[in-house]
Amino acid sequence: MVAISMVPLVLCIDVEPDAHVFAPGQSSPWTGFENMLELVPALRRRLEEATGKPAHFGWSLRIDPQIAMGYGSPTYIAEKYRAQLDDLAGAGDAIGVHPHAWRWDPVRQVTVADHADKQWVDGCTELAVGSFRTIFGRAPDYHRFGAQYMSTATMNLLRSLGVAIDLTVEPGEGPDRDAQLPGTVWTGQTGDFRHAPTAAYRPSPADYLQPDDDDAGEGGLWELPLTSSSRSRFPGPPHRLRSRLRHPLRSVRGLARRLSPTGGTASQPGHRLLAMWLDWPDPRHFWDAAFEAASGPQPPYLAFAIRTDTGSDPALRRTFTRIMDALMEDKRVGDLGFVTPAQALAQMGLATPI
Ligand SMILES: [Zn+2]
């Protein structure tokens, strides 16, 4: 096998309230985000020392109707923490958006993940991208829809809104993975990523899970799927999820399809998201799986996403800390570069360097 000289690694931090859902008047604090703001400078320094390169992260801001309901403005987080976000952008981090389609139902007193209502979903997408533009004067650096929701219509809308990179696709994951979340009702269906491409691709306007063979030019929208692996659900006793979310294991069957003209393959049967929020019995095995996964897509890259409750939930924080500590001790760490999504595409030779 050809040695991998440098693997771009994208780590997206979804900036969200501590609780996933809440009733009007009972909005959740943002302790996790505040803790992550304190945790990240030291992490950045350690990664820069270990990798010998600048280290960058992505911050995906919740901007959507649930945030407007809970905090009085859809852009609450960008307003309250503007100075901190400007510091992060100044350090070279990417600032993106992460809308959820949550809608409070006052009759049933539940939060509806209203993915069946296209108008509502479109409104959430437009609110996120449009409000970001109003606040920051530019398009978000990337987009990640919440709760694994994606559709061809939404991907096309993102393209038309000028979003350059999406990171919603989680290859190997079936639809409605998190639909058991207490206090929620789900309509429609989230993305069916069981056979999604595992390499960066330009989504076809006819089917967002298919690479657009015709689009070889500059510009347009790139999908950067998160990293999946056949080793992502470790053997042994059933894993304990530390998140408040429940993620029922699903059997993933079906034939893998070769999809990508850029040489990428579709996720294989048995592949699941390689999740940093799972409680790995041995965190070194996370990196074994990651480096193995990185040899799949050509050119290689890694992409992960965590939620800011990594900073507020003691178990999630311990899990993340153990994984990062294991990386610092891993002799392969110098092969990685923590980069923004745009830098990852540029280093893969897929988009114009920035
Ligand atoms: Zn989210």
Image: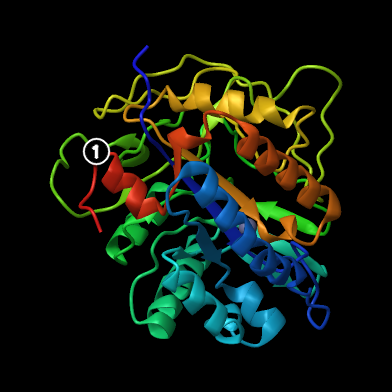
Image quadrant where residue 103 sits: bottom right
Note whether ligand 1 is within 8 Å of mark 1: no
Q: Residue at x 43, y 30 (%)?
A: 198
Q: Residue at x 33, y 27 (%)?
A: 298
Locate the C terminus by quadrant: bottom left
Q: Can you say whether 175 is above or below 284 in the image?
A: below
Q: Residue at x 38, y 63 (%)?
A: 141
Locate the N terminus by quadrant: top left
Image quadrant where residue 72 sits: bottom right
Q: Can you say whether 312 is above or below 229 in the image?
A: below
Q: Quadrant of ligand 1?
A: bottom right
Pick the residue in front: 135 or 127.
Answer: 135
Label 1 sits on residue: 212
Q: Amino acid at mark 1?
A: Asp
184 on left or right of 161: right
112 on left or right of 153: right
Say which element carries label 1. Answer: loop
Pick the residue in front: 325 or 113.
Answer: 325
Q: Residue at x 74, y 41 (%)?
A: 322
| Whole-percent x, y for residue 187 in the image | 64, 53
72 on left or right of 293: right
Residue 15 seen in render = yes
